[in-house]
Amino acid sequence: MQEYIKQQLAIHPSITQQDALKMCFQAAYGAEHLLTDIDKVRDYFVTEFDSCQPNDAPLAEFIAPEVCRVNLAAWKRLELPWEWLFNLFVESASVPMATAPESTFFRYVNEWSNFARDNELGLTFSFDENQKPQPVHHSQQYRDAERPAYRVISGAFTRLIPILTALASKDSGIIAIDGRAASGKSTLAKGLKAVIGAEIIHMDDFFLPPELRTPQRLAEPGGNIHYERFAQEVLPFISQPNEFEYRIFDCHTMSYNDTRKVPPSKWRIVEGTYSQHPKFDDYMDLRVFSDTDPQTQMSRILARNGQKMAEIFKSKWIPMEEKYFSGGILSCTSKTISQLKV
């Protein structure tokens, strides 16, 4: 937390104790307390956004590991649609910030208090821990000097910001989100769907059928996906404005038991490992690689899939993915397509 305190002091030297408390509250609780009347919140947002002048402020200022303030003036400088930021704010505000926000708030206050004391900042913190934390406004000193105009974005939605920035110059397109198991690919796709209205195609719908699972095929980097069917049922249609559909392979029944209709949309996302398979060439407008460390990966798989499946992932699926990453997309990506790692 002290790194975020240092950053805020460097960017905004006019911070007072009141502003520090506001930062602690936002870092622990987010902005869900602001969404009592969505229409009123939207009208206020549009008025504030219209009044902002573009400037060189940083787009995102992190105030906790997974909480940031997105500056309206910087968003406007990048010519990103205001609707995206509003949707991003609404979606992130609907997600609880912490499992124990009150204790998180007091922990952040103590961090601020210790930092202020150790660095002789002249900020005196006294807060009754028996008192329920309440949202506060920025101090008048801060408002006069900093002219704050931002929205708080929380949790996994912070990972969307670099993706949205990369889409700034585009009116439509295809986004391919590849990456490691349990790295948050589906969460990224769902977030983008909510923010920009994208439709999603899941690579999990293209598991390889049993008759193709030969030793030779599974030895290929990325050979355990039915890339032939994806090339036939998706690639010819994904860039077209019309609705199309493809078959869904169910790995539990080992059969095709449904179809998925993909409605018309300016934005389409292909989500899942193998979505950037070299056999698909450059069908996308933006490549996103979703990453995570091995320890976090296994803890998420264990929580999501249980011990038995976690062992299968560890011994079988993850090694196959890593072979694909090193022998497939990481050596075959085109320099003509925008690439992003999150």
Image: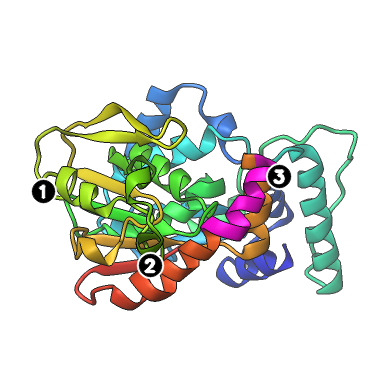
Q: Is residue 152 left or right of residue 300?
A: left
- Secondary structure beneath dot 3 equals helix
Give the residue type at disc 2. Pro
The crowd level at tag 1 (other Cα within 10 Å; few <14, some 14-19, many 20+) is: few
User: Mark 3 = which residue?
Assistant: 307
User: Mark 1 = which residue?
Assistant: 236
- Secondary structure beneath dot 1 equals loop
Q: Give residue 120's position: percent from left, percent from top.
A: 82, 73
Q: Is residue 338 above or below residue 22?
A: below
Give the residue type at disc 1. Pro
Q: How is the rendered protein coloured?
A: rainbow
Give the residue at x 65% y 60%: 15
- The residue mark sitting in front, 1 or 2, is 2
User: Mark 2 = which residue?
Assistant: 221
Magenta highlight on residue 227: no
Range of magenta residues: 306-317
Give the residue type at disc 3. Gln
* N-terminal label among 3 and 2: 2
- The residue mark sitting in front, 3 or 1, is 3
Q: How many marks?
A: 3
Q: Give residue 56's position: percent from left, percent from top.
A: 37, 69
Magenta highlight on residue 308: yes
